[in-house]
Amino acid sequence: MLEILGSLFPAAVLAGTPLLLGALGEILTERAGNLNLGVEGMMFMGAISGLAGSYFYEQAVLSSGGTPSGVISAVIALITSMLAGMLGALIYSFLTISLRANQNVTGLTLTIFGTGFGNFFGEYIGQKAGGYVAVSSVTKAAFSGLRIPVLSDLPVLGSLLFSYNWLVYLAVLLAVLMSWFFARSRVGLNLRAVGEDPATADAVGINVTLYKYAATVIGGGICGIGGMYMSMVTTSGVWVHGCVSGYGWLAVALVIFATWRPFRGMIVALIFGGLTIMRMYVSIPGLPAQIYDMLPYAATILVLVVTSMRSSREHAQPKSCGLNYFREER
Amino acid sequence: MTTQPKEPLLRMAKRDSISPRAAWGIRAAAFLLALITGGLLLLLLGHNPITVYSAMISGAWGSPTVARETVKIAVPLLITSIGISLAFRMKFWNIGAEGQILVGAIAAGWFGLFTATIFPKIPLVLLMMASSMILGGLYGLLPAICKAKWGTNETLFTLMLNYIALAFVKYLMNGPWKAPGSSYPKIAMLAPGARLTKVLGVHWGWILALVLVVVSYVYITRTKQGYEIAVVGESANTARYAGIRVGRVMCRTMFLSGALCGLVGMLQFAGADYTLTEGTAGGVGFTAITVAWLSKMNPFGMLVVSVFIAMLERGSNTIQTNFKIPASASDLIIGIILFFMLGCEFFITYKLIPRRKEEHHA
């Protein structure tokens, strides 16, 4: 039992990290009152852009006769994936905040667009590369588990806590930072005011439009990084058609389970990460693999129904979430 | 504290009214801009946009064979968008059409694969139709009940049901329904005698789709139930105040919505693919959202838009073979078009007034 847990836990952390990143991005977005259903699309955009960033960097260095550096490659992947997610979120923001389009439909469109964007460029670059896009072992190494001196060698704790790739620690750091940001910082409190009641926030002089734009675009950037995790870690640097496959949607659901709190996001992401990979670690005799695969989705439905049954005000979503703000209709 | 705030370069004001012609002019301009944006993208990739676009059109309509293929893509798209538009009209975001199509196909598949030797063709087809609609409807009803009772988020609920239906189809392919003697997971083909009859080269689903366009138009504009849907969509509180049982309308409409999607599953199984695979729904449920929204939930509009999108999808296969442009280009272009159409509504509702004009207005 302990042995299973010992191998399940690290796997759950690895599988839960893209969910956590997607959920953190969406928490930031929804806290500003924007319900962006385009997480799946932004993750796709981040996934291909991060991979393409690393790939073209490597090609450029190789063609000029140098040896690519894993660290630079990873930083480029981080930046390009973030920019791609931000681009998706910027389109969404422009349409919903400035042009007042319906948030639900715009988000769904962003998902359709982003999925097409990812698969299109994934295949396109693959064709040019002669089959498929894959990064070299240098970049792959930069995205594999870290070896932290002393800490990684600790018995038990070393493999449970100090053996992951750097994106895992980045995600945890982001969750902690965001918790502090919402609870303690002035800007974070202003942001929450915008999400709860934009008219009041506007009246006290908070620039509602600026806050909404900034939160949504940065949130999109975080989702983009989550997508990059899928292409760089989950599929280890190879473009797989449709690689995000529903993780973005699970991330949207996690926001509800986390009750819009980044810290709780870590716990639910860990649980759902575990559910997505449990089949590989805990076998249930007589249960076909395909039925086992339903687990995270069935669990999502179950939790959705249960949380909606006992919805309390404290755990409700930001009050203005999903509604556009019209100043002149105040 | 009396400093006058600087007047913005542009300010907006709600239009009092706009002539339908001007509104359509704005939409046409947005559509054109979307095509130009897509064209710029093609240009960046080193292709001549005009050649690519015209190859798409001829790839979709150039010969009777490809035209039939295009219609075959349009049929499921049209019926699905009619189905989900019923739910969308009451602001119930049913994005579970994929799942509803799949369970419909499973229901039809059970009758088609295992009772084809028992029943003659016509009762068999009727059984497939009825079972697919009932199962699809029930699959749509489930989230509606939870939404009506507890306000459960229907977007995520319906979406998760997609993945569950997909996993179930994979289970059937690998286990109980696996074709005997097949080395890899696949389901047997429907017996030729049980396949849907072709009319003008395409299974009769296209006639059904056209009938449904008219029927759904009458349903939403001329019946009490259609009116109830509209009121619930406008405001659930108003509906409640007017004595409409919101929960009941929600459940009834979602059953209908799911039933139409389930019917699509049957048509795909018995008329197009003759078997059941994980690609039976093939993204139709998502593309249909686009169709419904672009046509502003008008069934006749959906007819036009679904044929247009079918053309893009069929045409993108052609450009993949001719120019080595991945077929996912159609999703990309559809996304761009929809972004522009969403954006242009703003310019129909509002007008922008430059700073100078102010004096004349006041």
Image: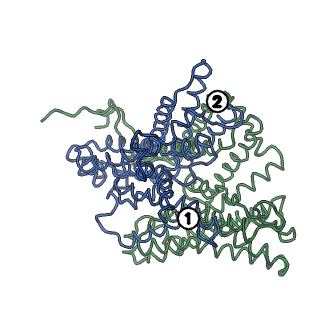
Chain colours: A blue, B green
Which label lies toward us, 1 or 2?
Answer: 1
Q: Is residue A293 above or below residue B331?
A: below
Q: Amino acid at mark 2?
A: Leu
Q: Which residue is mark 1?
A: A282
B10 or A280, which lies in front? A280
Q: Amino acid at mark 1?
A: Val
A141 or A77, which lies in front? A141
Q: Measuring from the top left, give residue A146's x and y in whole percent.
A: 46, 40
Q: Chain of mark 1?
A: A
Crowd rating for badge 1 (residues with CA inside 10 Å; few <14, some 14–19, many 20+) = few
Task: Write down the quadrant of residue A137 in the picture.
Answer: top right
Q: Measuring from the top left, give residue B133's x and y in whole percent.
A: 66, 73
Q: Which residue is mark 2?
A: B45
Q: Measuring from the top left, give residue A144's x and y in whole percent.
A: 52, 41
For the point 64% across and 52% down, which residue is it? Answer: B305
Looking at the image, the residue that sits furthest to the bottom is: B118
Name the side, left or right, on which B117 lies relative to A155: right
Q: Is residue B274 visible?
A: yes
